[in-house]
Image: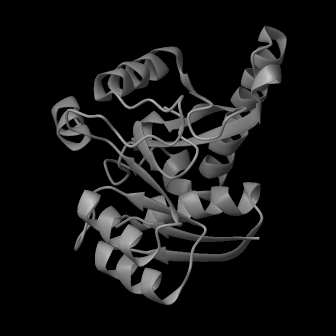
Amino acid sequence: MLSVLVADDHFLVRKGLIQLLQEHLSIGRLDEAGDGNEVLELARSTSYDLMILDFSMPGKEGLDLIRDLKDIDASTHVIILSILPEDRARAILGTGPLPRINERTVTDPEEVLREAAHAREVGYGFDREEYETGLTCMALAIGLPEADFYGAMSVSGPTARMRDPVVRDRMLDALRRSTALAVAALRRESPALAAGAVPAVFPAFRASASFGADASE
């Protein structure tokens, strides 16, 4: 079973993400934090399989936080969820090349931005063996526009099967139905969401950067 840490300085975002993780993953330990310093304190005392972090939080944040976490335990998978203007994303990505995991990993920052823009346009993204050879991942956004909240759901499978247009379309249809159920569950569990009464409390998870985990644009 997985050991997971969820960190975001917005309480409702943390709770919504925790609920989704508990419903869809087999988790043995699930901790939460509200700022970067708390993340580091927990990381020093607990070994996590996965950390899901907001990019901008009080205390240590962003790339500095990721570097410190990797110094503590280089094997931990860290996923960053955040909204960033393109100029900020470019500054973070730098001029490249980005770290290479295998021969298919996208290392050109401009190509990363192009693929992210394409994923936003079509509504889903692919990891085409960029992390693990032979494995393709498809991800679809979970959107609550009135609450300015986005998450994602994904499915992975053997590349040989995922290349089949029939299989790909079936997977995409299943993801669409699953994300619709997730949105309905979020609305049902949160009266504020059901009423469309949550303003900019939720950061929009429109862009994601993955460090050492399956990446889907």
- Asked where in the image residue 11 lies, by quadrant, the reply is bottom left
What kind of colouring is applied to the model shown? one colour
- Residue 46 placement (x, y as % from top left): 54, 85
Closest to the observer: 91 or 58? 91
What residue is at 56 percent from the left and 80 percent from the top?
A: 47
- Asked where in the image residue 61 lies, by quadrant, the reply is bottom left
What residue is at 21 percent from the left and 33 percent from the top?
A: 90
- Residue 78 placement (x, y as % from top left): 48, 59
Left or right? Give the position of 124 relative to 12: right
Closest to the observer: 21 or 4? 4
- Residue 84 in the image: above or below residue 167: below
What residue is at 43 percent from the left and 86 percent from the top?
A: 44
- Asked where in the image residue 110 lies, by quadrant, the reply is top left
- Residue 208 placement (x, y as % from top left): 42, 42
Closest to the observer: 119 or 111? 111
Query: What quarter of the picture does the N terminus occupy?
Result: bottom right
Marks counted in the figure total 0
